[in-house]
Image (tube, rainbow, N blue to C red):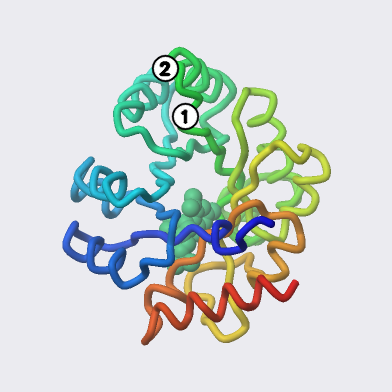
Amino acid sequence: MENPADKIIVPLDVPDVESAIALIHKLPEVSFWKVGLELFVATGGEVLNFLKGEGKKIFLDLKFHDIPNTVKNATKSVLKYDVDLLTIHATAGRDALQGAKQVVLEGGQGRPKLLAITVLTSINPRQLAFDLKVPIELPEYALNNALLAKESGMDGAVCSPQEVAKLKEVCGDDFILVCPGVRPEWATKGDQQRVMTPAKAIASGADYLVIGRPITQAEKPSLAWAKIIQEISVN
Ligand SMILES: O=C(O)c1cc(=O)[nH]c(=O)n1[C@@H]1O[C@H](COP(=O)(O)O)[C@@H](O)[C@H]1O
């Protein structure tokens, strides 16, 4: 049977390598770590090499959003790190997504798997309509972006757990769905808008959950981790 702990990705949202290594050592149970903009901009590949050395899986969350030529070449630069997942905004458009996929195929390793960001979990329907002037409902927009990603050869998408059931139904079981915006009942929302509990997010069809501050900012991160694993295991 699948180990529920393998479904949780913890972000290393810290400013330097020392803090990253301290967190990795504090949570030896975690097998899948996410390196995002804060840490990668500060440290480049150093932390990725450390994670590899520890035998961890890596989600490199750089959220590329640029013209096709730049996205393609940036993806080519990522190949040398041998990471498992990489993010690109769906709104970079079909040519950028297809170009990135082409580069991965040419690399011949089948990695990283490419995930498209659909609609950031920090955006609420009002912001989407009034600030970003997107004239369709948020769930429909997220689905549209996921379908564009699928048609363009992406391996999956990042979405809120609130949209994951619909995206799974329409995009199919093979399309990997990763959900941030996950909050146990006992955690605060922070800047996340479209949230759900870990157990409900898994039950709704998420393949992976990204859970950061409820674990990393907890007084005892290991306890928070264990509590979440227990919550998703009883379902
Ligand atoms: O791509 C992501 O991982 C991501 C996409 C998204 O829509 N929302 C989102 O919160 N994230 C990331 O998921 C993590 C969530 O962290 P917490 O809010 O602390 O659980 C952060 O590292 C975000 O950068």
Vertical side of 222 occupied by 56: above or below: above
Asked if labels 1 and 2 touch by Cβ distance under 8 angstroms, the answer is: yes
Instruction: Tell me where residue 179 sits by quadrant.
Output: bottom right
Q: How busy is the neighbourhood of tag 1: few (under 14 within 10 Å), some, or many (20 plus)?
A: some
Instruction: Tell me where residue 157 sits by quadrant.
Output: top right
Cβ of mark 2 under 8 Å from ligand 1: the answer is no
Query: In the rendering, at what x and y percent does residue 229 appear?
Result: 58, 73
Query: In the rendering, at what x and y percent does residue 110 appear?
Result: 50, 25
Q: Give the amino acid at mark 2.
A: Gly
Give the residue drawn at x 19%, y 50%: 42
Question: Is 86 positioned to the left or the right of 77 in the image?
Answer: right
Q: Which mark is residue 111?
A: 1
Instruction: Tell me where residue 11 sits by quadrant.
Output: bottom left
Give the CA distance from mark 2 to mark 1. Answer: 8 Å
Give the residue drawn at x 58%, y 57%: 7
Residue 61 showing in the rendered view: no
Task: Determine whether the residue tagged by mark 2 lies in a helix, strand or loop.
Answer: helix
Query: In the rendering, at what x and y percent does residue 171 appear?
Result: 76, 37
17 or 75, which is in the foreground?
17
Where the C terminus falls, by quadrant?
Answer: bottom right
Query: In the rendering, at what x and y percent does residue 145 appear?
Result: 66, 37
Task: Determine whether the residue tagged by mark 1 lies in a helix, strand or loop.
Answer: loop
**Residue under pointer 2:** 107
Question: Is 27 positioned to the left or the right of 9 in the image?
Answer: left
Where the N terminus falls, by quadrant?
Answer: bottom right
Give the farthest residue toward the front. Answer: 1
Vertical side of 114 occupied by 25: above or below: below
Give the residue drawn at x 45%, y 12%: 106
| Total residue callouts | 2
176 or 122, which is in the foreground?
176
